[in-house]
Amino acid sequence: MARIIKRRRRKRRVRRECLRCGRVFMSEGNFNRICPSCREVNANIAMNAAEVSFDHDYYGFTK
């Protein structure tokens, strides 16, 4: 019977260009295409959007 050997994929650190700002950074793997500073900016934007949505009702009126 044939044995199936699973290989672990190693995270490959590669220099990539950020899709948001264009700066070159060391990527943590294939999934990582946005630099750390842009990732932080995106997280802040998401947090601010969540705060605004909690301050207003469904129709946009202030609670």
Image (spheres, rainbow, N blue to C red):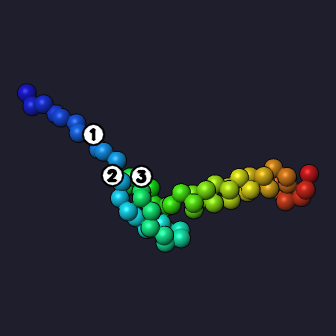
N-terminal-most mark, 3 or 1 = 1
Mark 1, residue position: 8
How much space separates mark 3 and mark 1, taking CA atoms?
A: 16 Å
Percent coordinates x, y for residue 29 in the rendering: 38, 52
How much space separates mark 2 and mark 3, taking CA atoms?
A: 7 Å
Please state, as top left, top right, bottom left or bottom right, where the N terminus lies in the image: top left
The 10 Å Cα crowd at callout 1, few under 14, some 14 to 19, many 20 or more, is few
The 10 Å Cα crowd at callout 2, few under 14, some 14 to 19, many 20 or more, is few
Q: Indicate the amino acid at tag 1.
A: Arg
- Which is nearer the eye, 41 or 57? 41
Percent coordinates x, y for residue 60 in the rendering: 85, 59
Mark 2, residue position: 12
Cβ atoms under marks 3 and 1 closer than 8 Å = no
Residue 33, quarter of the rendered image? bottom left
How much space separates mark 1 and mark 2, taking CA atoms?
A: 12 Å
The 10 Å Cα crowd at callout 3, few under 14, some 14 to 19, many 20 or more, is some
Eye-nearest disc, 3 or 1: 3
Mark 3, residue position: 28
Query: In this view, which residue lies farthest toward the top?
Result: 1
| Tag shown at residue 41 | none
N-terminal-most mark, 2 or 3 = 2
